[in-house]
Amino acid sequence: MRIILISFILLFATHIGINAIQKINTIQDQKIDQLCSIDKAYCKR
């Protein structure tokens, strides 16, 4: 029973972590796009 509970908690935490990383990447991409629209020298692509 404990192993099932621990497994569930680890899967849930992993899911939250992956979603948080994806959200941060999206926000960073939006900021980079804003900077690129201001000045092309800021673009890394």
Image: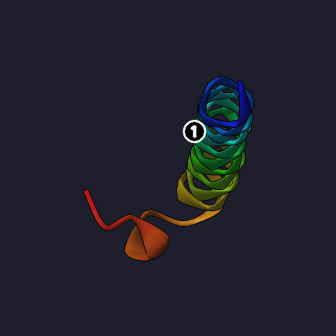
Scheme by which the image is coloured = rainbow
Q: Position of residue 32 (x, y in %)?
A: 57, 57
Crowdedness near tag 1: few (<14), some (14–19) or many (≥20) residues, C-alpha within 10 Å:
few
Q: Residue at x 60, y 40 (%)?
A: 14
- Residue visible at 31% across and 67% down in the picture: 44
- Percent coordinates x, y for residue 45 in the rendering: 25, 56
Q: Identify residue type, mark 1.
A: Ile
Helix, strand or loop at label 1? It is: helix
Residue at the spot 66% in from the left edge and 46% down from the top edge: 17
Instruction: Name the quadrant of the N terminus.
Output: top right
Q: Nearer the viewer, residue 41 or 31?
A: 31
Which residue appears farthest toward the bottom when viewing the image? 41
Q: Quadrant of residue 15?
A: top right
Seen in the picture, residue 6 relative to 25 is either above or below; the reply is above
Query: Number of numbered discs present?
Result: 1
Question: Which residue is label 1 attached to?
Answer: 18
Q: Observer-nearest residue: 12 or 23?
A: 12
